[in-house]
Amino acid sequence: LDPTSIFPFFHQWEKEVDLPSKPAEHPETKMAYRLVEGDCESVDSLLPIAPEDAAPAAQIMMMNGTSGSSDIKNVSVSEMTSSDYYFNSYAHFGIHEEMLKDQVRTQSYMNAILHNAHLFKNKVVLDVGCGTGVLSMFAAKAGAAKVYAVEMSKIVEQAREIIKDNGYADVITVFEGKMEEVELPSKVDIIISEWMGYFLFYESMLDSVIYARDKWLNKEKGLIFPDKCTLYLCGIEDAQYRNEKLDFWDNVYGFRMDSIKRIAASEPLVDIVPRDQVTTMYQPVLEVDVHQVRKEDLVFAAPFRLQMVRADFVHAIVAYFDVRFTRCHKPISFDTSPYSQPTHWKQTVFYLDQPLPLQFQDVIEGTLACRPNARNHRDLDIAISYKVNAEFIEASNVLKYRLR
């Protein structure tokens, strides 16, 4: 089903917004640039590094999963991150099973590689975060002369066995360790990586891909698969979830539990959003060119403008992204939109502080800001400022979230 047949406004932005040839904030590069013209609030104003509204300290007993020891840490709720279990969580086959069964994801990579064997033949390929080794085997099957497969988690042990069992041990060399610490035998012609996370950037390996690109990729003709991504926003109606999961804390057997409600509201929901809940046009807010993006560009603030496609409420703002392999002979892409086949990335939902009753063509304007968490760069601190001036409501606020 073509979403434009339901909401004829969906492609209006293509007519209204001329994509800049250079980024608004870094005119000397073409890395990650905003897709909406106009001023917006700064990252530092929305997400100061030392936030004043940190949650009260609560002593939490947490096992140190990174070291594998039984050391106990005392941390506050606001400081808890995924750093202690990130790499070890990828050692279990279950998370790889989920990704491999994601047909949108895996078949897109397979088609991008195997349908472009002319690009891979006799080339040296680097797979950043190889997991079970499936992308490395696609590259080998496409005729790569050598594949360097780098993996930090202990799934690397199974990857070696899988690669050997499928007859590619003479082509694929597996390196165990962080990309930033591994020494490869040579430069590479192509980098492949499935680096994207929830909200595009959560727990993503983009930092590692940038490092690998700068150190190991052939500067003249090197390719990256995929090489372009765009982050989008839209508004949704979701009264049922808000009532069940957020407003529930207003009256728990006669008691108010506002402190828990604040924590619940600050944690974005990762879930599949039904397409009929979308109430606004979608808005592309940020594009990433993996050939050019810099690590510092992953701290960003971008304006957005969401126009209603019907009279309804907006309870939340939803983020999703697309992924593009533009260097293929015939470009290949997929997206994680509510209007597309679901993927394991689903969508990321940011609930607002209040329902917004809006009319057809009313507009929500604001700024989306994001920066990696100070304690763990794989977690994200996110802020959304918004303002509405409509018939039934005038409202504005700055809302802060932690994706962890």
Image (cartoon, rainbow, N blue to C red):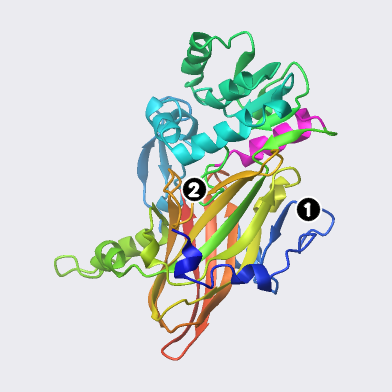
Question: Which residue does the image show at 45% across and 57% down from the upper left?
Answer: 339
Foreground of the two, 247 or 32: 32
Look at mark 1 in the image and give the residue it sits on.
30
Asked if residue 291 lies left or right of residue 94, the reply is right
User: Where are the magenta residues, as a range?
Assistant: 204-218
What distance separates the C-alpha of mark 2 from that of mark 1?
A: 24 Å
Closer to the camera, 63 or 285?
285
Q: Residue at x 58, y 56 (%)?
A: 231
In this rendered view, identify the residue nearer to me: 68 or 202.
Answer: 202
Rendered image: mark on residue 198: 2
**Which one is earlier in the sequence, the residue at label 2 or at label 1?**
1
What amino acid is at disc 2?
Answer: Tyr
Q: Residue 44 at x, y = what percent?
A: 65, 64
Give the residue displayed 80% in from the left and 59% down from the top: 22
Q: Quadrant of residue 230?
A: bottom right
Residue lying furthest left: 253
Main secondary-structure element of the magenta-colored stretch: helix
Say if the magenta span includes residue 133: no
